[in-house]
Amino acid sequence: MKKYINRLFALTALLIVGAACENDAELTYLKDVQFPSEIKITPSTTFVLLEDNADTDAITISWDKVTFPIEAPVTYAVQFDVPSDITGSNAWLNATRIEVGQDVLTKTFSVRDFNKIATDLGLPADKANKLIVRVEAQMDRKVFSKNVELTITPYEKAIVFGEIYMPGSYQGEWNVETASVLTAIEKGVYQGYASVLPGYGTGFKVNTARNWEEFYGSSGGDNIQKMNTTDLQMPGEGSYQIKVNLNTLKWSATAYAWGIVGTAQTGGWDNSTPMSYDHQTKTWKVTADLVPGALKFRLNNKWDVNYGPKDATTNTINRDDQGSYTITEAGTYDVTFTIDETDPNTNGYPATATCTIVKK
């Protein structure tokens, strides 16, 4: 009898443990989670994209909140793929994924960005193609909305060459011969970088050549006007991405800086030490006091775009690589970062960049 009682106790214990495990799983994994409704596409699901409208909005995708059994922020992302890649064992593996953010329920893409998504997925220009979009919600697992089919006619981006220049007080002197270069990224659209150091001014003009025969100044707000003598103004000290559109006569200055990050610098892994842009050498630079520890590079004090070395014995650094350099001796170092980049709004960063880390 005692033997049977012991077996009964053991079986009861197993049932209790199993039930507890099942309840725990139900709280986090077994409870059904899904999008409450289909995602919404505006203004339509058919698009004919034109390069002349590159700066205008093309598509807005919105969705209702997805409720998980845990009370925490939900991270959303939008995925695009071609119809042939959304089934089978490799479904969606080649998709273009754009993270939207936590508890954000809408995402708008410009004509430029939408066209790049389409062409990166191999859709031919000047032809109507099918494109599939869905939204991903992630917390303790990933769930996906129903697929929506789009029809898109992308354009072939014109190959453009040329540059304009931005002489200004950020140089320490107004010298058009050594001014920062804004390179053509599209027809009539130019982009470059400038840093305003402490004690330097923020004013500048935009010149079409390294002379003063034709230049643009400010006509108020984000507007520019040919031969206007009023200076354009960067927001203040810091580094900026400057974009000038001679088609629309608009300009912008967006805070933008590469920085060093890691335990070798003062901010650890949480806060980068920003670098300044040397417009003459087209190099990002910083002189910093470092201690023994790890060091790598990232953009705008975020992890969205970062570089680390696959081989720390070289000066080549690789995008999204987990590697870092090891600083073995405390001291003052000159650190540089050089990258050949396209339009950051399209995440067109190359696979590799270069750097130097030299103890003074």
Image (cartoon, rainbow, N blue to C red):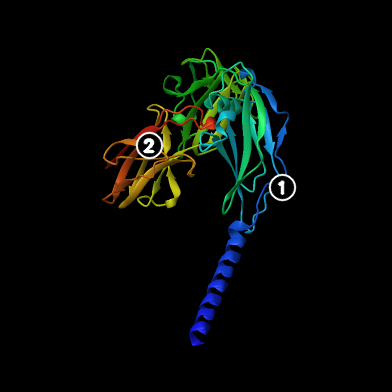
Residue 21: % across, % down: 56, 66
- The answer, for residue 86, to whether it is visible in the render is yes
Q: How far is the residue under mark 2 from the one under mark 1?
A: 40 Å
Provide the secondary structure element on which disc 2 rests.
strand
Q: Label 1: state its secondary structure.
A: loop
Q: Position of residue 45 (x, y in %)?
A: 70, 28
Relative image position of residue 151 (x, y in whole percent):
66, 25
Residue that protrudes farthest toward the front in the picture: 1
- Up-down relation of residue 220 to residue 106 (above or below): above
Choose between 250 and 316: the one closer to the eye. Answer: 316
The answer to the question of whether label 2 and label 1 lie on touching residues, with beta carbons closer than 8 A, is no
Question: Tag 1: Cα neighbours inside 10 Å, few (<14), some, or many (≥20)?
Answer: few
Q: Residues within 10 Å of mark 2 (few under 14, many from 20)?
A: some
Amino acid at pointer 2: Asn
Based on the displayed image, in which of its 4 quarters is residue 247 positioned? top right
Q: Earlier in the sequence, mark 2 or mark 1?
A: 1
The residue tagged 1 is 36
Q: Quadrant of the C terminus?
A: top left
Left of 241 or right of it: where is 287?
left
Residue under label 2:
318
Kind of residue at disc 1: Pro
